[in-house]
Image (cartoon, helix red, strand yellow):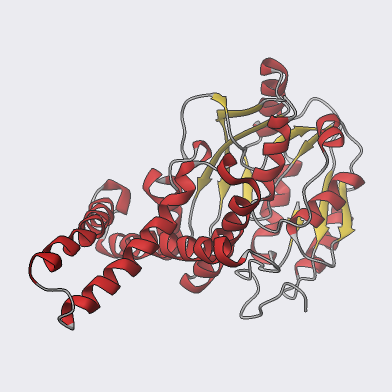
Amino acid sequence: MPVLNERGYLRRAVETVLAQDVPGPTELVLALGPSTDGTTELARELAREDERIILVDNPAADIPIGLNLAIRAGRYPTVVRVDAHSELDPSYARRALASLDRVRAANVGGVMRADGRTPFQRAVARAYNSPIGLGGGAYHGGTQEGEAESAYLGVMRRAVLDEVGLFDESIRRGEDWELNLRIRRAGYRVWFDPALAVTYWPRESWTRLVRQFAATGRWRGELVRRFGRGNSLRFFAPPLLVLMILLAVVVAALQLTGVLQGWWSVAASVVYVPLVVYAALVIGVALGPGGGRGWRDKLWTAAVLPTMHLAWGWGFVVGIIRGAHDTVDTSRLGSRNTPLP
C-alpha cells in the first residue's frame, strides 16, 4: 500500500486489509511517502498495534517506487496491491486467490466500486461507476468475467513479477497498465473477476479532481507515445472532445468576424453537432437515475462529467505533444507542484 497524506482514510483501509479471510499467513507493507498531515505518525501507531504491518520509507513519494519498495520487502508468493483510499470486502483476497488458481492467471482484479461521503464526492463516484464517466473499462462496472487489458489494483503472482520486472519507476501514472501489458506480452493471463469489488473514495474537491485527471491524461499521452496502439481506443475519446471544442471555437470566431459566410459557414457549422450531442448526453445522464436523487446531486453530476473528460483530454493532448516528463498527481498535496516537501 503506497501512502501519502491519507490520515482520513488510512486506518479504515488498513483495518479492511488486516481483516482478510485468507487461509495462510499475511502481511501488510506500507510504503510511506513524506506526508504532512500526520499520516506517517498514524501508520507507526497502527504498526505498533499489529505486528503484521511492515513500514518502508518512500521519500520519492512516487507510487511505482513505493510499490516496488513494498514488493521487495514482502515475503510471500502472492502480492495483493491495495490502496489507502479504498476498502476491501473480507473475502476479497480469498476470492482472488481462488480465481488465480482456477483460471491459471498471473494477475486478477475486480470492480472499482466508487463511493462518496459528500455530495461532490458522491457525484464523482457516480461518474466513476458510469460507462459514460470513465469510458466503460471492465473494472468500472463490468459484469462479464474474462481476460482483461489491465486489472484494478491487482492480485499478482510474485514469480511472474520477478520474471517480467516490477513496476516501471519512470511511469508515474498508468504504471499498472504498463505492467499488465508486459505480463500479457510475456504470455500470461490478466483476468477480470466481477465478484471482486473494492470500495474506492474519489477526490473530495473540484480542484483536486482536475489536477488528478490532468496528470492521468498527460501520462496516458506519454504511454501512447511509448506504446502506440497497445492503448485501447477508448482512451482517445476525451482528447478528441477537447480538439472538437478547440475547432468549434475557431469556427465560431471565423463566423463572427465574417471570414466564413454563406454555404461555407453552414458547412463549417457541422463541427457543433458532436458537441451538442455530447452536451445532451451529459444532461441526460445527470437528469436520469445515474445523476443522483435530488437537484443538487444532478447539478454536481452535470459538472463533474465534463470536468473529468476535459481535464483528462487536455492532459492527454499535452502529453502527446510534449510528453509527461516529471508530471505528478498533486491532488493529494494542496497547491504544491511536487510530492516532496
Name the residue rendered at 54%, 59% in the picture: 217
**Residue beneath the point at 86% across and 55% down:** 47
Residue 279 in view (yes/no):
yes
Find residue 122 and report its image quarter: bottom left
View extreme (top): residue: 102
Nearer to us in this view, 135 or 197:
135
User: From what the image shows, is residue 222 above or below residue 257?
Assistant: above
Q: Residue furthest left?
A: 262
Percent x, y of residue 218: 57, 62
Left or right of 118? Residue 148 is right
Residue 147 drawn at (x, y percent) = 58, 25
Image point (11%, 73%), residue name? 261
State the residue at coordinates (76%, 29%).
22
From the viewer's perspective, tell me whether residue 225 is left or right of residue 120: right
Query: In this rendering, does residue 20 appear at all?
Result: no
* Rendered image quadrant of residue 301: bottom left
Nearest to the observer: residue 205 or residue 41: 205
Can you give x and y, in whole percent of width and height, for residue 305 in the image?
37, 59
Vertical placement of residue 132 versus 305, above or below? above
Residue placed most toward the observer, 126 or 255: 255
Q: Position of residue 295 (x, y in %)?
A: 25, 62
| Quarter of the figure with the C terminus | bottom right
Q: How many marks?
A: 0
**Residue 139 vertical position relative to residue 213 in the rendered view, above or below:** above
